[in-house]
Image: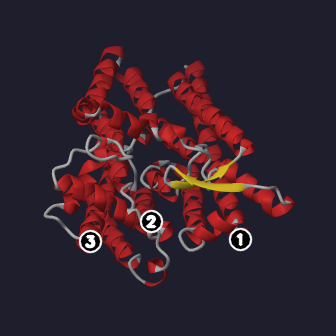
Amino acid sequence: MLAAFAAGLASILFLTSWALIHRGFYKRDQIVDTPVYHRYGTAMDDRRIPYRDFGLEYPPGALPVFVIPALGDADFPTFTRRFEGFMAVCGLALVAFVAAALVALGAGARRLAAALGFVALAPLAAGSVVLSRFDLWPAALTVAALAALLSGRERLGHGALGLAIAAKLYPAVLAPLAVAYVWKREGRREAIRCGAIMAGATAIVVLPFLVLSPGGVWDSLTRQASRPLQIESVGSAFLLAAHQAFGLDITMDSSHGSQNLAGTLPDVLAIVQALVQAAVLVAIWVAFARGPADKERFVLACTAVLTAFIALGKVLSPQFLIWLIPVVPLVRGRRGLAASALLAAALVLTQLWFPFRYWELALKFDGPASWLVLARDVVLLALLAVLALGLRERHANGLARGRAT
């Protein structure tokens, strides 16, 4: 009853935040993806087959977000209103699934209030980017999967995670943790079944389009891996800082739908960053698999692996931070409060240059925007450190308890 009441209040607060980001300075200089989404949706409404009849850079699980607002040959203003309504519904679902996850974690009133309040107010910190990107859709599916897993519905959770992967590939980094969680708690056979359910849920969405256009689907799935060092990534942030401080010569190149740094040094940094990212992800997976599989540790590992994927990636678009909004507040105790404060700082720092100063950053390497990018990325690295250290400490505590018994 308490959780339902808290979720209801948080939903009202979320809708208030949603209304506020349509007003005042939030409306200034917006950089939106909705024209691209409208083009995709209109093509599907005209019965053109995605990947075969037109190119699309997102996986098939994203298609409902594009086609539903475009039904009935909707013009762009109508599409935009419907799309924002769809995202608002995803945001409300996100609040509900966070509440369900907290109940499964045995959260008390203070923890419920803090976590749900953070999620409800997050649009104000993130800014207008939440209105014109579809990331609330996979974020809602991802936290639904976590809520189901924490509630003991392992098969349902893996099915939801499979759908989340089909919507936007990033939840795949949670798959090894989810399977390991079930393996350690329910045994190898159940883990294999859950893994098969997850793979099957992804395949149900992806395979029909893969059969119709294997090349088109493969291109959409692999395009992200071939992207260069995006201008907001950690590597780019340090190069921008070096440009401001020491006059390092850097060059911007627009490709893959983003603005990137071009040249030998950025290319080398992109490779190094990808290797570091992979190593950290594997380290987190292994650390979790070697320790106890209690619920709080599982949440901490999931949050850490998502943060590593975002903070260390060679692409770090502003909307990626939306992925963290429903999971960081689930972390327990003072560490959770510190992590939520760092995420809030990262969201606000991002909003200080995006969208208002983004083109000054991309085209002119604007000084204040360059330092803001560096500050945001350092905050994300600090968030990763806080979470990773927590995972290590919980592992050590678990080993100590095991020896004591």
Dividing the picture into quadrants, the one containing residue 251 is bottom right
Whether residue 151 is visible: no
Closer to the camera in the image, 188 or 61: 61
Sequence-first disc among 1 and 2: 2
| Residue for badge 1 | 368
- Position of the N terminus by quadrant: bottom left
Closer to the camera in the image, 258 or 160: 258
Find residue 337 and report its horizontal and vertical position in percent.
Answer: 55, 56
Find residue 50 and report its horizontal and vertical position in percent.
Answer: 26, 45
- Say which amino acid is labelled 3: Arg
Q: Residues within 10 Å of mark 3 (few under 14, many from 20)?
A: few
Sequence-first disc among 3 and 2: 3
Going by the picture, which residue comes out furthest to the top?
A: 189
Find residue 351 and report its horizontal and vertical position in percent.
Answer: 55, 69
Calculate the distance from the C-alpha at mark 1 to the C-alpha at mark 2: 20 Å
Calculate the distance from the C-alpha at mark 3 to the C-alpha at mark 2: 15 Å
| Residue for badge 3 | 81
Mark 3 element type: helix
Identify the residue at horizontal 34%, vertical 37% (top origin). 216
- Position of the C terminus by quadrant: top right
Dividing the picture into quadrants, the one containing residue 274 is top right
Q: Residues within 10 Å of mark 2 (few under 14, many from 20)?
A: many
| Residue for badge 2 | 129
Find residue 168 and report its horizontal and vertical position in percent.
Answer: 38, 44
